[in-house]
Image (cartoon, rainbow, N blue to C red):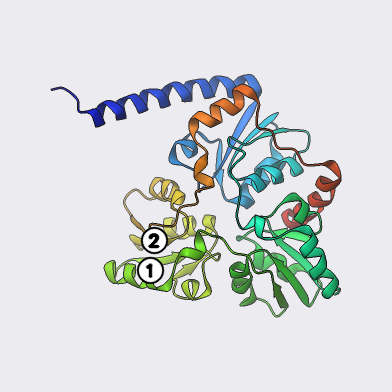
Amino acid sequence: MAMTMDQLAKQRKEEQNRELKERLMQLKKERNAIILAHYYQRDEIQEVADFRGDSFLLAQKAAQTDADVIVFCGVHFMGESAKILAPDKTVLIPDERAGCPMADMVNAEGLLDLKRKHPKAKVVTYINSSAEVKAVTDICCTSSNAVKVVNSLDADEIIFAPDKNLGRYVQQFTDKKMILWEGYCNTHDLLTLKDVEEMKAKYPNAQFVAHPECRPEVAAAADFVGSTTAILKYCRETDCDEFIIGTEDGTGYQLRKDSPHKKFYFASKYLVCPNMKVNNLKKVVRALETMQPQIYVPPVIADKARQALERMLQVQ
């Protein structure tokens, strides 16, 4: 029986991916390279990654690796963090257009101005920020350790930037005064309580899990709130077999890999980060072939930003 056009296209795509994967393995060996992929990346990238993780885990891997080249499959601030923590490594990003709208919502000048207004406050900046912003920060955090970081500081006031939703979540677990920057994640902030209620009505036996970058009323409706890694762990270990997922849809790859017998429904069709999705397998291969685009952070910026990142990694 002759194959349909769709079947032919699918077969060709599979052949191309096999060829790309073979080329990638060759290049990794030649360059002594590793591939770090965020959980929000396309499935085809997560399949070939040496390490999959959230911002915190990938920052740790970048700091610890013996590889000469790091291909960071994420967005630009993640590549910057890797370069800051591993300054002697070559850090590549498959597509330099992979930015982060939330990171663009805060700048160093504005943060310094807020520090002048609150001189006794310590600045905690989400890792989703530029190197310039990290350079005027006391300590960085990720969604997985934000509460620990805030509570570790010897200060009664905390300037928290740029994610107001994560800041409001942290506020529930600290007595410190939180001064919140008015930033947010474009993708997570799109999820509404109405979306969640509709999904709960459709799947009454499913638990709802949410990322703290979601709006406060959405997080309040969740059975579990946590970082991407925490959500994956919860879904993997709990007895429930159905989940409504309140975070970016790239996590579906690891969720299905961990628990193939469980069912996962994303809370909205809009939980897709377009910036994360600009990377693909072909671009990863091309980056290693051309050794471009490379991440560069000026040393004077990197030295200051490194202090904020290393302080974060030291918080237990």
Q: Is residue 309 left or right of residue 169?
A: right
Q: Residue at x 68, y 69 (%)?
A: 181
Q: Say which quarter of the image contains residue 114.
A: bottom right
* Circle 1 crowding by C-alpha within 10 Å: few under 14, some 14–19, many from 20: some
Judging by the rendered image, the residue that carries numbered circle 2 is: 268
Q: Quadrant of the N terminus?
A: top left
* Circle 2 crowding by C-alpha within 10 Å: few under 14, some 14–19, many from 20: many
Structural distance between the alpha carbons of marks 2 and 1: 6 Å
Q: Residue at x 30, y 68 (%)?
A: 205
Residue type beneath disc 1: Asp
The percent coordinates of residue 152 (x first, y second) are 75, 68
Q: Which is more toward the observer, 34 or 277?
A: 277
Q: Which is more toward the observer, 98 or 137?
A: 98
The percent coordinates of residue 300 (x first, y second) are 86, 45
- The kind of secondary structure element at disc 1 is helix
The percent coordinates of residue 292 (x first, y second) are 65, 29
Q: Is residue 69 left or right of residue 37?
A: right
Q: Is residue 70 left or right of residue 4?
A: right
Asked whether residue 232 is in view, the answer is: yes
Judging by the rendered image, the residue that carries numbered circle 1 is: 195
Q: Say which quarter of the image contains residue 84.
A: top right
Q: Residue at x 79, y 51 (%)?
A: 305
Residue type beneath disc 2: Ser
Specify which label sits upstream in the sequence, 2 or 1: 1
Q: Quadrant of the C terminus?
A: bottom right
* Count of marks, rendered view: 2
The percent coordinates of residue 103 (x first, y second) are 65, 55
- The kind of secondary structure element at disc 2 is loop
Evaluate if marks 2 and 1 touch, with contact meaning CB atoms under 8 Å apart.
yes
